[in-house]
Amino acid sequence: MREIKKTELLHSQVYHIVKTMVMEGEFRPGKRLVETKTAEKLGVSRGTVREAFRMLIKDGLLVQDEGMVFVYNPGPQDILDVYECRKSLESLAIRLAANNINKEQLDRLQLIVEESKEAVRMNNSEKLTTLNHEYHGIIVIASHNKQLIQLFDVINAKVLYIRNCILKNRFKSFEEFVEDHERIFSALKEGNPAEAEKEMLSHIEKSLEVANTSISI
């Protein structure tokens, strides 16, 4: 059970705790969340939970319908819309990053690729998910575009949620995705925006193909 720390704002702690529970599938898509029950479970006030829920509704991970709060349960078109947005944002990010990325970021991307190869060999999907998240985050940060970074933070929460809770068992070839990351890294290292964008778009198209299968769920 996660514990509340007195050194941090309560509503912020509850926000992060509930967000983690949603992202990790402890609260399933479509599940109704009740303020009183959540407050009792975490040992905080209803007002604190209400504020945390409000923040999560703003993130799009919770939805409110006729006064009731539910965990985001995207339909097929919602999933495709999110991935289309990701495609646009990350194609811009990679173009900018090719001109702005620094040596430290490049070194970290290279290490992530090597660690990802090892995770594939060990069949460690959890580690691969963590490394994938960091990899794409570094590229977006390397864009040096503050508005892009903010927009990515919003869409990325939904991307991670959809991947973890909706499409988790539909990703078959992690090895292929790691190979994509290696090619993207090479283009970034060479400072080639056009090649980097081409490889990133191809990479995300593969994810879109996986998302497309959700239509038949």
Image (cartoon, rainbow, N blue to C red):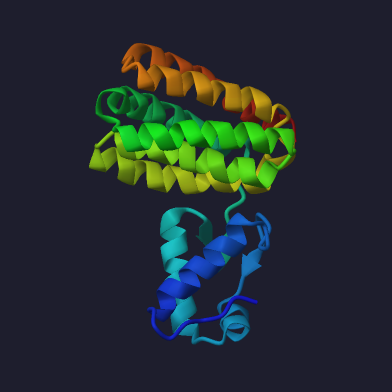
Query: As rendered, which of 34 and 67 lies closer to the eye?
Result: 34
Residue 185 location (% of width, % of height): 44, 24
Q: Nearer the viewer, residue 119 or 24?
A: 119
> Which quadrant: the C terminus?
top right
Q: Residue 64 vs residue 152: left or right? A: right
Q: Is residue 133 above or below residue 61?
A: above
Coordinates of residue 4 in the picture (x, y in percent): 51, 81
Residue sitting nearer the eye, 48 or 127:
127
Horizontal side of residue 48 vs 171, given as left or right: left
Residue 61 in view: yes
In the figure, 41 relative to 118: above or below?
A: below
Res 177 → quadrant: top right
Residue in view at x 42 percent, y 41 percent: 137
Most foreground residue, 194 or 88: 194
Q: Measuring from the top left, give residue 71's x and y in whole percent.
A: 59, 59
Residue 49 percent location from the top left of the image: 49, 77
Quarter of the image with the N terminus is: bottom right
Residue 163 can be seen, yes or no: no
Q: Residue at x 25, y 23 (%)?
A: 99
Q: Name the residue located 56 percent from the left edge and 87 percent from the top edge.
A: 43
**How many numbered discs, if any?**
0
